[in-house]
Image (cartoon, helix red, strand yellow):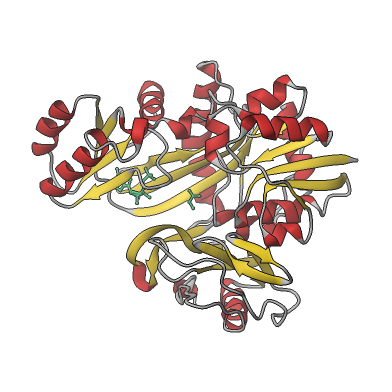
Amino acid sequence: MLRVMVVGGGAREHTLVWKLLQSNRVAEVFVAPGNAGTAAIARNLDISPTDLDALSQAAKDNEIGLAVIGPEAPLSRGIVDILRDLGIPAFGPTGDAALIESSKVFAKRLMHKYGIPCARDAIFSSFDEARDYVKKQALPVIIKADGLAAGKGAIVAQSTEEALSALSDIMEARIFGDAGNQVLVEECLVGQETSLIAFTDGKTVVPMIPARDYKRAFDQDLGPNTGGMGCYSPPSFSDHELTNMLTKTILEPVVQAMAREGKLYKGVLYAGLMLTSDGPKVLEFNARFGDPETQVQIPLLKSDLVDIMLAVIDGTLDQTQVEWSDDACVGVVMASGGYPGSYKTGLPITGLDKVDSDLLIFHAGTGAEGEKICTAGGRVLTVVATGKSVAEAREKVYQNLSLIHFEGCYYRKDIAAEEE
Ligand code: AMP
Ligand code: GLY
């Protein structure tokens, strides 16, 4: 029996903990740092996901037999390498392999070298050169900081002024610190945006069921970009044929390219894609599970997640079953008033005990204050329902959402509305 440690504290990690506990190979799950939702089903450890020393000490002390890394920051800093050197199986790419997310310049150079379709770009480390180049580009133009910037590093500039101000913020004011040492200036791709997320052991690529997420804060895709306000699976525009085509033309060549570069990629590989009139092109890669995609994908996974993760680590994914349910899943994020800007925390959440028993509530920014569960972050909960169809799951989730409340809470009313 395994003792498992999950690193991270969002609804994505709560979902992974919930699923891992369903495996009959798991004795106990620890979460660093977790939230009030994970505290109810597992053991939270008061450790930051970027405190690599404390994480590896906790993994040793608790005799962890499988570590699962949620967020990109510990992956890019090499937590998987550290744990592996201690003999602890860790799910996720090594620091070198995580460069596919943590350096957009690395990812673009890799794609150009191996002929993987993506936007035309130019790379700059000098502000003056970037400025001169940007002035000559067609609009809109895309400006991207090279490094990790908590999802805020890509700016779609509608005017030259906006592009120059983004360049100046990144390269002169250095709002993302060293992540802005280099910038990418990209052509703007037009088309339907989609993502493809897969398990890979560095050789075999097994796509997950497709999911559509919603990045903007408000209905009809208005308002500022967020970490994600909701998600559903499967979207009707994304069938098996498209998934297989994207796996063959994008994900498999990328995984082979990483192996050839000496950066064997194991874990979850997430490709953000634009389906253009010229064919699919890559917008970005993430080196991890999606959030909120995980909250609607993992409840549809019929197979044992521990089996899949250990097969990824051992390189035996080709011999492992990854089966998905035919049901549909809709997840809606309840956020604090003001998010993604500033917001209050410590507000009591009511109604969690009133919802249907088959509803899934995955916690993100929550904490316990005495007996009460209170808000502790911007995205507070992902409320998830499954059903025979997306429409059925959608109806169920919205009926229940109105029962949960905290001061100032808001959520989008149009998640999965296009499937009605
Ligand atoms: P990224 O962080 O690279 O995924 O960019 C964030 C978002 O910016 C994407 O989800 C797209 O909506 C948009 N984006 C990024 N690159 C491009 C591009 N070359 N053309 C059009 N939109 C883009
Ligand atoms: N939902 C987008 C992401 O996880 O990056």
Quarter of the image holding residue 202? Answer: top right
Q: Position of residue 276 (x, y in %)?
A: 32, 48
Q: Answer left or right for 394 relative to 114.
A: right
Q: How many marks?
A: 0
Q: Is residue 109 above or below residue 287?
A: above
Q: Position of residue 121 (x, y in %)?
A: 25, 32
Residue 372 visible in the picture: yes
Residue 266 visible in the picture: no
* Residue placed most toward the observer, 175 or 118: 175
* Residue placed most toward the observer, 167 or 257: 167
User: At 53% across and 23% down in the image, what residue appears?
Assistant: 96
Quarter of the image holding residue 40? Answer: bottom right
Q: Is residue 389 above or below residue 400?
A: above
Q: Position of residue 140 (x, y in %)?
A: 18, 49
User: At 67% across and 69% down in the image, what residue appears?
Assistant: 373
Give the position of the N terminus as an image quadrant: top right
Q: Answer left or right for 400 relative to 190.
A: right
